[in-house]
Image: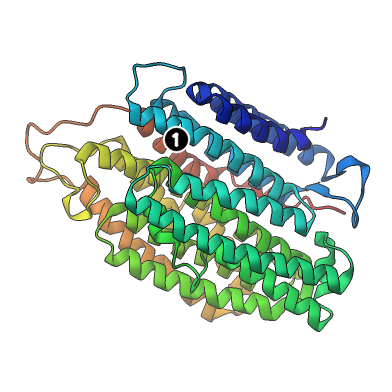
Amino acid sequence: MSEISLLVLLPLLAAVGAAATPRASGLWGLPTTALTAVIALWLALDILQDGARVVAIGGWAAPLGIVFVADGLAALMLLMTSGVGVAVALQATSWGVWPSSRIDEEKASLRAGFWPLWLATLGAMNSLFLSGDLFNIYVAFEILGLTAVGLTALKGTPSALRAAFDYLSAGLSGSLLLLLGVAMAYSATGRVDIEAVPMLAETAAGRISLALLVAGLAVKAALFPLHFWMPAAHSSAEPLASALLSALVVKAALYVILRISIEGGAGIEALRLALALMGTGAMLWGSWGALRAARLKLLVAHSTVAQIGLIALAIGVAGDTLQQNGLWQAAALLMLSHALAKAAMFVAVGRIAEELGHDYISGLNRKEIRPGAAEFAFAIASVSLIGLPPTAGFIGKWILIDGLIARDAWIWVALILIGTALSAAYLYRVVSRCLRGGPHIAPAAHNPAWHTGDITALGLATSALVLGLASAFPLTLLEITVK
């Protein structure tokens, strides 16, 4: 059995084991997540050395069979998922790993529900990133949608359950559009593998199919104006669940949109323009929501809408990949940077709320508590999201803006700079309160005690920072495609 198959089967089988033994679910979750990360790294290094790999499941090649394609883009997404997953899994150990009566009932319930949902999410995302078949991508989305709804509802509070219902409704709507698009693709071309996308751009029925596919993916990615469900879902969920939903789950839809853009060639410029316009709207609307948010988790959730908009804009303006302008690589790097920074933010927000007893922005500068590790992690993640050097966010924006300047696309450059200024404005609202010293801090104020979540948040935020200095690795990986 190849490592490509293991990346899908291992977490899915572990999810079944974790669901069957809820008291010992952590014994399935943490080792499986770590082993999956090792396999993903092994596969990435193998691709760097020997090139992209194509595996026909069961020996049936496309267009009849399901094909897994492991190229540089897929490998980078697998590394992103497993890297964030390991960090979040380490944080989840605070709920207990071993069967024990020493943890309270609430944490035991979170542990029992979290691990099966996370492991199924991991398996579904790995399958989606590797799949070269549109119908298999749809199946992976169905699994992913159900687990995401479960993660949203994990807290069991009324607000979480309402948000989970909205998430489910939006997910089913997106799935219906996606399935219709796959059906029309098969009707137009007689095949559903990803290589059929250029053929779809040649006929009217095929273009309708592509429009349906992108519309379904836009709903799942919460791309403006189809983002109505996302802020509540991400802000109402358990912080660890929010980290996974914002950092990883929405990237699945953006990844498929990027794949369609790459494969579509010059025949889907109208779809790319629509993506760029929707991305612009998301940047502006999400930033406005973040500027007005009273609670920290809601600000971070609206920030996700804005950052998704930036990535969609990057995909939209990349144009035909035959131009070799490198803009689609910028979109992939922005996805990776956002995943690390946003996961760090949500974990840090959870820790700040634990320290203060609330997450209201106006009350972040408490006199009896000095800024702790979680506040510093949030500040570092903010630097990456804004796109300041030397972070990966800066490298992604630099590549994007440099490519647009070379094409004299000054309007898009101006919009990206406006989005950057807005992100700096709403993140400054938090950082200025979290890290500000002065007379409002009482002489007897104490630093919060260290917690696993502090290490997780700092590790993720620092990774986004270090990745900017080591950006040659992901950029080299992205150059490897199927010949």
Mark 1: which secondary structure? helix
Pick the quarter of the image with the N terminus.
top right
Q: Is residue 285 above or below residue 106?
A: below
Q: Residue at x 11, y 46 (%)?
A: 438
Q: Residue at x 84, y 67 (%)?
A: 186
Residue 132 in the image: state x and y as whole percent: 79, 54
Q: Residue at x 60, y 39 (%)?
A: 120
Q: Amino acid at mark 1?
A: Gly
Residue 450 in the image: state x and y as whole percent: 30, 27
Quadrant in the picture for residue 455: top left
Pick the quarter of the image with the C terminus.
bottom right
Quadrant in the picture for residue 34: top right
* Disc 1: CA contacts within 10 A as few (<14), some (14-19) or many (>=20): some
Left or right: 246 as drawn, with respect to 55? left
Q: Is residue 164 above or below residue 380?
A: below
Q: Residue at x 51, y 64 (%)?
A: 222
Residue 112 in the image: state x and y as whole percent: 47, 30
Q: How many marks?
A: 1
The one of 391 and 122 positioned closer to us in this rendering: 122
Residue 46 in the image: state x and y as whole percent: 78, 35
Residue 324 seen in this snapshot: no
The one of 334 and 3 positioned closer to us in this rendering: 3
Find disc 1 in the rendering and name its residue: 459
Q: Is residue 434 above or below residue 306?
A: above
Q: Is residue 436 above or below residue 372?
A: below
Residue 361 seen in this snapshot: yes
